[in-house]
Amino acid sequence: MPIRLFDSLSRDYRELHPAQPDGVFRFYNCGPTVYAPAHIGNFRTFVVNDLLRRLLELEFPDKVKHVRNLTDVDDKTIRRAREESRPLAEVTKQWTDKFHADCAALNCLSPHVEPTATGHIPEQIDMIAALERRGHAYRTDDGSVYFKVSSFDGYGALSRVKERELRVGSALAGKPQTHDADEKEDGSDFALWKGHKPDDGDTFWPSPWGQGRPGWHIECSAMSKKHLGDTIDLHTGGVDLLFPHHENEIAQSQCCNGTLFAHHWYHSEHLLVDGKKMSKSLGNLYTLDQLKEMGHSPAALRYALLAGHPRKQLNFTLEALPAAEKALAQLRAFRAALTPGGNSDPFAPALAALQDDLNTPHALGIVFTALHAGPTGVAPAAFDRVLFALGLDLTEPAKPATATPPEVTDLAEQRWAAKAAKNWAEADRLRGAIAALGWSMLDRKDGYALEPAKK
Ligand SMILES: [Zn+2]
């Protein structure tokens, strides 16, 4: 059964097939801006993309090419480097490494190519120059270059923004575009190249238009062209990127290349936390590290993020994580109970549900119905296939990395000293005190370990 996915451009469900004769499925998704830790809302998008990548791998083995970019130069990264008085490359390397570590903890497959914006300056300049030659771009006095939205008839097809609304383009984008607000001919035009400003410090490159840096949107057009060609099979991202970012990518790529940019567009929905939009002021922008400090495992977060339909808003609460941990324990117990020689596959309908527009709630429902029916006769490979698709790695028990409270460490130190003094009665008393706080002290040859007591 082919994968069927809602297409944001045609607003219809369409099957995914590689369009080019080499049979390679070309998959691009917008990556993170590396200036801070990604939060769980960002990771919802990346986990959904990972689910898609895994389904594509099952459907087109060895024929998937997945490209995901890193935005390592823009207003936010430059501001962060300036605030911390550090070189831009040092800041972006720090947050790139952190992003990779978090993705690995969430069991996300690495993209085949992970290009950076700063690593593709000539490609971006070439594309901007081509747009200028073809009458789709114009220079301004401050050394910037803008895309002329009125030169592309297809503008707005993805986001359905009306002509009238385009006139106030920057307001629609939801963010004030201070950097390029003054010079452009029309409110909806957007920067391809930004002439150097004092705030940019030593972050600039030479170009036919003078020193400056690329605008944000052009990087995805240039990098997808370089690594996947003029036309890609599937372009994805969070719904927040649909306008203006993806609309602008289509305009740039199609005006430069003179051909269709992407056969299929897919957008996953927002994550809410406790029923509210995530924001710094509400303090609900959880990072993976914060959840780990609370004792939750990355596997539980992945499970919780997959529990809701990717194209519907998902309301995340901390209570979802112990429930996810319990579900993972049930899956682990079922896997352990499977024996070689089983040949039934009660999980095929779950895989089919995933292939049908990534219906994760339905798929998980089918999986647990099969679990309740018991492991007898079930083929381990069938279970492993659906686990692979969901990216649920059960090989390691999900061990919450709970920080040891200081009073427990104190008691452990006292008990270690009591043992060294051969004061066994006191050592036993202290063991009891540690247990009363919900911890076990494990004696080793030359030290001890503390872990949460098994319930
Ligand atoms: Zn992008």
Image: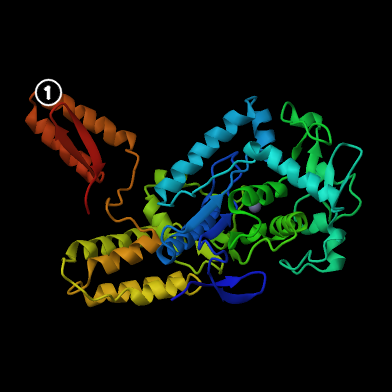
Q: Is residue 316 visible?
A: yes
Q: Residue at x 59, y 32 (%)?
A: 91
Query: Residue 327, position in %: x, y?
Result: 32, 64
Q: Is residue 447 above or below residue 455?
A: above
Residue receiving disc 1: 420
Front residue of 252/280: it is: 252
Judged from the image, the secondary structure of the residue bearing numbered disc 1 is: helix
User: In which quadrant will I find the N terminus?
Assistant: bottom left
x, y percent for residue 419: 12, 27
How many marks can you see? 1
Q: Can you see residue 284?
A: no
Q: Nearer the viewer, residue 315 or 340?
A: 340
* Kind of residue indicated by mark 1: Ala
The residue located at (37%, 77%) in the rendering is 349
Q: Position of residue 345 (x, y in %)?
A: 27, 75
Residue at the spot 52% in from the left edge and 64% down from the top edge: 315
**Residue drawn at (57%, 40%), measured in percent from left and top?**
36
Asked whether 258 or 273 is in front, the reply is 258
Q: Residues within 10 Å of mark 1 (few under 14, many from 20)?
A: few
Which colour style is shown? rainbow
276 or 143, nearer to the observer: 143
State whether residue 312 is above or below residue 121. Answer: below
